[in-house]
Image: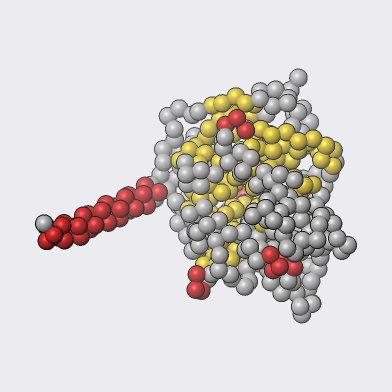
């Protein structure tokens, strides 16, 4: 009996192992295949202060999608956190992964993150990607690459930014990208859960970075010429920034970041300013204890948040809704909320936040990204194993 079991158990283990490998291989093979458009798109009607909002499902079956870029032809580019870039047609068909994406460290919160079109995309076909880049001995750091978008592959891939030093750990990579009108790209990132790194100017963790589009450092960056500071830095004292957008009305840069337990915040980052983490915060540690370094919500020489949530919605993604005078959503700022499972709409009076509304809560989806098209439609990504790309048609108003 013992001999029979001794022979049988290894065989069972081998069979189970082969089965698991086959399942893993099948999953990878499935991920590499295009996904046809859904035969029938789901549609939902959700309430809003201005009237019903129609929510249309464009595509589903995306693996933890992180960012969406709207292409001029009506299609979309979508990043999946495990490291895949896909094209989604206007009809909802999902392409096989686009080849040529740089090596991605896809663990924890790391992976393929933001995708944006270059300001001259119509002529250059250049895109920018942010991602967690692998380093030595299991380390990783936020990086940014630019590339020419082809039908099935990227070409002319150039890594224009690499966070230094690379650190070990699975969390707080950021990262969003935005352009100003003067030929600069802004890059958000996290402090990699090394709190005081946000205050150390010789490190890039917890910093908002400004570069020229080719990755070179602008001569007028605030810390250029200082031996004790990285010249890429625009502002510092940030925690984990996953929202960034430029107000098209004014050119003002807006940024939002995760607090710890409470204290998610919006900042309007200015050059050389210190936004306080972890010396000041509106949140507490996840353990429920006060953060040891924090000295309260205000401190001389540190910038208090422009807008703050005492209870964290877990912000990710940001887009302005402007230039649509007939819409009840005109002059709004949209933010995705992961923990809250909603799309937050802030009503703006100039730069002043005057009202907040939370949409999509009844559907129970984690909202990872939000973008607004030129014709006033709102597009969002849900962060799930079977993530969705959705289109929201704004209410007609009263």
Residue at x 13%, y 59% (from the top left corner): 2
**Residue closest to the eye, 237 or 25:** 237
Task: Examine the rendering and report whether any part of residue 256 can be seen.
Answer: no
Residue at x 75%, y 28% (from the top left corner): 328
Q: Height in image: 105 above or below 326?
A: below
**Residue 384 place in picture, x, y as percent:** 51, 43
Quadrant in the picture for residue 44: top right
Q: Is residue 398 left or right of residue 127?
A: right
**Residue closest to the eye, 91 or 288:** 288
**Residue closest to the eye, 340 or 190:** 340
Q: Which quadrant does the C terminus fall into?
A: top right
Q: Height in image: 316 above or below 379?
A: below
**Residue 300 place in picture, x, y as percent:** 88, 62
Q: Is residue 250 left or right of residue 23?
A: right
Residue at x 69%, y 71% (from the top left corner): 203
**Residue closest to the eye, 249 or 338:** 338
Which residue is most to the front? 1
Q: Is residue 28 left or right of residue 197?
A: left
Residue at x 87%, y 63% (from the top left corner): 301
Q: Height in image: 392 above or below 103?
A: above
């Amino acid at each position: 009996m013992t001999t029979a079991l001794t022979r049988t158990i290894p065989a069972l283990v081998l069979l189970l192992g082969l089965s698991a490998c086959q399942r893993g291989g099948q999953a990878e093979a499935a991920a590499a295949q295009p996904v046809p458009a859904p035969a029938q798109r789901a549609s939902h009607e959700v309430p809003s202060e201005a009237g019903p909002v129609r929510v249309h499902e464009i595509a589903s079956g995306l693996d933890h999608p992180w960012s969406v870029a709207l292409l001029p032809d009506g299609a979309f580019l979508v990043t999946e956190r495990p490291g895949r870039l896909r094209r989604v047609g206007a009809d909802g068909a999902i392409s096989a992964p686009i080849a040529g994406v740089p090596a991605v460290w896809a663990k924890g919160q790391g992976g393929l993150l933001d995708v944006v079109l270059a300001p001259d995309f119509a002529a250059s076909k250049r895109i920018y990607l942010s991602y967690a880049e692998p380093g030595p001995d299991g380390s990783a750091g936020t990086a940014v690459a630019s590339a020419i978008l082809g039908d099935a592959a990227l070409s002319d891939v150039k890594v224009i930014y690499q966070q230094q030093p690379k650190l070990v750990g699975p969390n707080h990579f950021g990262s969003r990208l935005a352009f100003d009108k003067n030929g600069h790209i802004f890059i958000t990132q996290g402090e990699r859960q090394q709190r005081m790194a946000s205050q150390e100017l010789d490190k890039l963790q917890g910093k908002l970075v400004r570069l020229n589009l080719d990755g070179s450092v602008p001569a007028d960056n605030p810390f250029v010429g200082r031996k004790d500071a990285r010249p890429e830095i625009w502002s510092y004292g940030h925690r984990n920034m996953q929202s960034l957008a430029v107000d098209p009305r004014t050119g003002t840069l807006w940024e939002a970041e995760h607090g710890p337990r409470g204290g998610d915040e919006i900042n309007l980052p200015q050059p050389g300013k210190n936004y306080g983490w972890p010396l000041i915060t509106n949140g507490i540690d996840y353990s429920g204890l006060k953060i040891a370094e924090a000295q309260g919500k205000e401190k001389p020489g540190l910038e208090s948040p422009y807008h703050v949530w005492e209870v964290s919605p877990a912000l990710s993604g940001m887009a302005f809704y402007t230039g649509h005078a007939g819409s009840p959503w005109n002059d709004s700022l949209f933010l995705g909320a992961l923990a809250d499972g909603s799309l937050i709409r802030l009503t703006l009076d100039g730069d002043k936040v005057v009202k907040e509304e939370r949409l999509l809560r009844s559907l129970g989806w984690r909202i990872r990204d939000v973008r607004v098209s030129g014709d006033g439609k709102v597009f969002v990504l849900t962060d799930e194993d079977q993530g969705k790309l959705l289109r929201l048609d704004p209410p007609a108003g009263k």
